[in-house]
Amino acid sequence: MAEFTELSEKIAKIKNEVQDELSKLESSKSVYEYKKNILDGKTGLIGSLMKQMGKVPNEQKAEYGKKVNELKAWAQNHFEELDAKLKAEEMRLRYESEKIDVTMPAVKNEKGNLHPVTQVRNQLTDIFASMGFDIYEGTEIETDYYNFTALNTPQDHPARDMQDTFYLSPDFLLRTQTSAGQIHVMEAKKPPIKVVSPGKVFRSDDDATHSPMFTQMEGLVVDKGITLCDLKGMLDEFVQKIFGKGTTTRLRPSYFPFTEPSVEVDVSCFQCHGKGCKLCKGTGWIEVLGAGVVNNKVLEGCGIDTKEYSGFAFGIGIERVAMLKYGINNIKQLFESDLRVLKQIDD
Ligand code: DAH
């Protein structure tokens, strides 16, 4: 009998203890752990109570079993209740921390754009590539030979005065023209040749339309039977692509030592379409590039048989094209990195 009373007291005590413990639990995880411990059949405070049945007198076994089961059911209820309460709170906190305001304006990532000179350079490269031209990129430091002599401009040739040169030494200089690339290409490759060569060039020149550093794109075609007509045909196609449909070209006689005949190429004004405006200074025409039939002396210097082959060449100022296309009247704006200017040009 003593055993039963003792066990009954123990049950009451356990109930108090569990109640006490539950009030301290703060997370559904700790409820789970505690529940697992306490209901464990071997070691659990409640779970192991049935094992004591042996000590209970036979006539009280039923009573004892009932009490233990009641305690178990009571504990289960309390665990479930507390678990539900804590889980609800945990969910609320999670919603709180993960909440987003869908009405908040999005953070804008500013979109950058390429520099206008790069844009025009890419446009030109794309156009010429679509016409079957290869790309050759030369070096910015050149020898006097490639920049001048091989281009039929030997020492003391008056045409050297056309380009004020930065010499690094008597033999080396900063190239004044991408035309130097023509010689490298013709030395490296037999005709047919169809190549454009973009890159920076340097001249001691500085005003609203000239900068000591600027960018050119050279073009060279050498093949059998090439004439000035081929140049004109290609240019007409090219200007429509870069300045728009309906743009035409006009050739004016000019002089370059490496071409004979040489021409200055004008395009019909793509703003007023020939009527005369500020851009074309009322003439209806805008000068855009120099060109010509490659001088036989240049071809022969590169070992090309002029009885079989002839060629045309042209040189475009990329900043000039950018200034015309985007209405920039001072070349410095292309080199000052003023974002207010550069951001406006995204072609
Ligand atoms: N190299 C010349 C310059 O910088 C431009 C030029 C003119 C290039 C005629 C050519 C050409 O290839 O045929 O002024």
Image (cartoon, helix red, strand yellow):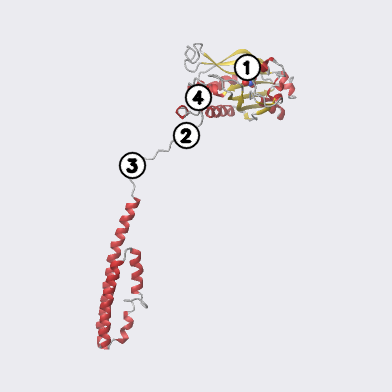
Q: Which of 337 and 113 lies nearest the eye of the viewer?
A: 337
Q: Residue at x 64, y 29 (%)?
A: 140
Disc 1 versus disc 4: nearer the observer: 4
The N terminus lies in which quarter of the figure? Answer: bottom left
Q: Which residue is mark 4?
A: 333
Mark 3 to mark 1: distance in Å?
A: 63 Å
Q: How many marks?
A: 4
Q: Residues within 10 Å of mark 2 (few under 14, many from 20)?
A: few
Residue 318 image offset from top left, x and y in percent: 56, 24
Which of pointers 2 and 4 indicates the residue nearer the eye? 4
Q: For the residue labelled by badge 3, is the local secondary structure a helix, a strand or a loop?
A: loop
Q: Does residue 52 appear left or right of residue 252 in this picture?
A: left
Query: Could you tell me residue 103's position as x and y percent?
Result: 32, 42
Gap between marks 1 and 2, in whole Å?
42 Å
Residue type beneath disc 4: Gln
Q: Secondary structure at mark 1?
A: helix
> On screen, 70 above or below 341?
below
Disc 2: residue Cβ within 8 A of ligand 1's nearest atom: no
Q: Secondary structure at mark 4?
A: helix
| Relative to 225, 285 lies left or right | left
Note whether 41 is above or below 313 in the view shown: below
In the rendered image of this protein, does residue 114 appear above or below residue 224? Answer: below
The Cα atoms of the two marked residues, 2 and 4, are separated by 18 Å
Q: Nearer the viewer, mark 1 or mark 2?
A: 2
The kind of residue on which mark 2 rests is: Gly
Mark linked to residue 112 = 2
Q: Position of residue 2 (x, y in %)?
A: 26, 88
First in residue order: circle 2 vs circle 3? 3
- Which badge, 1 or 2, is on the more N-terminal residue? 2
